[in-house]
Image: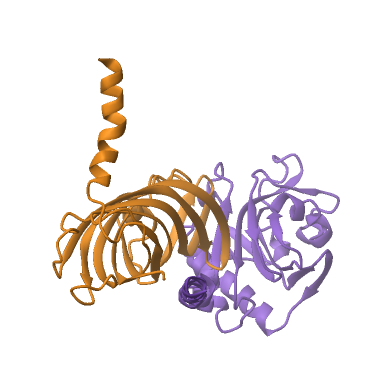
Chain colours: A orange, B purple
Amino acid sequence: MKSVLKTSIIYLPLLFIFSFARAQQGEVKLELNYNYSLPLGGFKNNVISNGSARGFAGGLKYVLNDKIDLGIYTGFQDYYQKYPRTVYHSDGQDISAVLSNSIQTVPLLGKVMFNPMGDKKAMIQPYVSFAAGINMIFFSQYLGEFGSAQNSVSFMAQAGAGVQIPFSKWSRSGFQLGVNYNYVPYSKNGYDNLNSLGIHAGVHFPMR
Amino acid sequence: MRKIMSLFSAVVLAALFITGCTKEPLNNLTNEESRIYITNRDSAVNFNSYTTFSISDSVGVIDNGDAYKSLNAVDQAYLNAVTKYMKQAGYTLVEKGQKPDLGINVSRIYQTSTGVMSYPDYWSYYGGYWDPYYWGYGGFGYGMPFYAYSVYSITEGALSIDLLDLKNVATNKDKIQLIWNGLIRGSGIFNEATADSQVKALFDQSAYLHK
């Protein structure tokens, strides 16, 4: 009984995946996106509250079947904020400075994308995605012109949703538009996370 | 081949995007914003207990270990500003021969190396820059009751204002204690036009420094 259960757990998802296999199976597509990012939570409250219009994301996705894509994604986002001059107090010392925070992030993620209407030739194809991997974080903080930098690598998980719009009914290339919630724990310098919401738009096309 | 070219194009576009669109914090600072004002104090001192002060007649220039005195227009502007804000804080300016409670030395410090500038390091040779004899205590030394440091990463200078306790030399084991220090670092210092506002910033953040 136990072995039947074990076998079911392992093979049923695969059976589910391969049951959707269609003509595009095995195709590799390149996806490129412009990305706007909004810091959330502790990232927004304690580090940088400005949204970042300086980002992109892209990757290669393998079309497992009409409904499921597997991919490797990366990207870049630049966050920056300058805070007005403030006096920072510590025991016996006061420092008046303009504080600037500058953060660049480069994620490297494995992603699964589920297209519930992938087997239908609809002009608007919704999708949901889940990704996990690492995020390389380059954090510079300046008091006036005097800075210090700290580079680190953090775990990152991402949940996303959006739509894909083929260039034509039978095209395997198209536009996509979506949002991602990015979970990035970050426990340095008294901060707790670098979570963000990303809004992206871009194109995808087969690699022939 | 087309696959490789597509990937190569994507990488080149991404690289162009990264280098072109990153906001460089140092390029987004004015001279005023680049400056930091640091004040340190001896927390055990009651600044209200002092009444009179005297200020040095010139500015000490500490240039990578060499030291000399200077009194150009810029130096005079800093001396004037310190005098002005000490008076506004309620202290009375007297000649140094009138046994002032507080002595003030102003120094321009130039460093051409990078790293951490430790006050004790610079302070350990303080008697060589400012002979205690100047304050009427020949043969005495200086004492620094607190540890402080400033991190710097460029090869430029700092302006330092040191407030010395001349009133309690005898009770401080024959040492002229540093009781307050103001340090200005960043772009556009040593400037006659902004000397007053720079010194004002140090006094503004030292509300405890008053008679």
Q: Position of residue B155 (x, y in %)?
A: 71, 70
Quarter where residue B51 is shown: bottom right
Taking the spot 79% from the left edge, 73% from the top edge, the residue there is B69
Q: Is residue A90 left or right of residue B142?
A: left
Q: Position of residue B29 (x, y in %)?
A: 50, 75
Given residues B208 and B118, the one toward you in this image is B118
Given residues A73 and A18, the one toward you in this image is A18
Quadrant (top left, top right, bottom left, bottom right) of the N terminus of chain A: top left
Quadrant (top left, top right, bottom left, bottom right) of the C terminus of chain A: bottom left
Taking the spot 36% from the left edge, 61% from the top edge, the residue there is A27
Taking the spot 18% from the left edge, 74% from the top edge, the residue there is A169
Given residues B33 and A2, the one toward you in this image is A2
Quarter where residue B52 is shown: bottom right
Q: Is residue B4 left or right of residue B100?
A: left
Q: Is residue B83 above or below residue A9?
A: below
Quarter where residue B191 is shown: bottom right
Question: What is the total number of numbered labels drawn onto the structure image?
Answer: 0
Q: Position of residue A131 (x, y in %)?
A: 34, 50
Q: Position of residue B87 (x, y in %)?
A: 52, 67
